[in-house]
């Protein structure tokens, strides 16, 4: 991984990212990777008819972190999260 993809942990709320999304250490410097994969522990099932536009629903990850995901995501799915914004990126 090149240095341009490494974001120092102090650029974020260190406690939230370290406990919920994770951090890595290289050469004594702690950093957050650009994205992480996590499993959805719980999310409500999609309701038919709620499909106008980009509809999101809350999902709780196994780490306890809450993230907004598209309706097609279900409990047990693995998703990629952008650590710079804390937002859903894609289903893995």
Image (tube, rainbow, N blue to C red):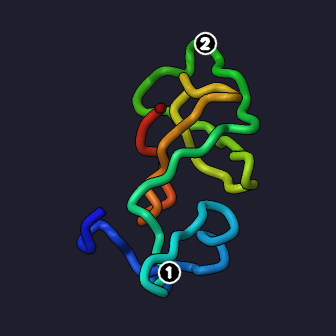
Q: Residues within 10 Å of mark 2 (few under 14, many from 20)?
A: few
Mark 2: which secondary structure? loop
Q: Which residue is mark 1?
A: 30
Using the rendered view, name the quadrant where residue 6 is placed.
bottom left
- Residues 28 and 18: in front is 28
Residue at 42% x, 44% y: name it: 89
Quick check: 6 left or right of 72?
A: left
Q: Are marks 1 and 2 in contact (CB under 8 Å)?
A: no
Using the rendered view, name the quadrant where residue 11 is placed.
bottom left
- Residues 7 and 88: in front is 7
Mark 1: which secondary structure? strand
**Depicted 24 relative to depicted 57: above or below:** below
- Residues 53 and 32: in front is 32
Q: Which residue is mark 2?
A: 48
Residue at 73% x, 29% y: name it: 44
Residue at 57% x, 27% y: name it: 73
| Lower sequence index among marks 1 and 2 | 1
């Amino acid at each position: 991984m090149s240095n341009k993809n490494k974001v120092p942990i102090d650029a974020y709320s260190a406690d939230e990212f370290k406990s919920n999304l994770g951090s890595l250490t290289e050469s004594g410097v702690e950093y957050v990777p650009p994205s992480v994969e996590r499993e959805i522990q719980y999310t409500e099932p999609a309701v038919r008819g709620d499909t106008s536009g980009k509809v999101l629903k809350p999902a709780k990850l196994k780490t306890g972190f809450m993230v907004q995901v598209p309706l097609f995501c279900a409990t047990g799915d693995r998703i990629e999260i952008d650590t710079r914004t804390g937002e859903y990126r894609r289903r893995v």
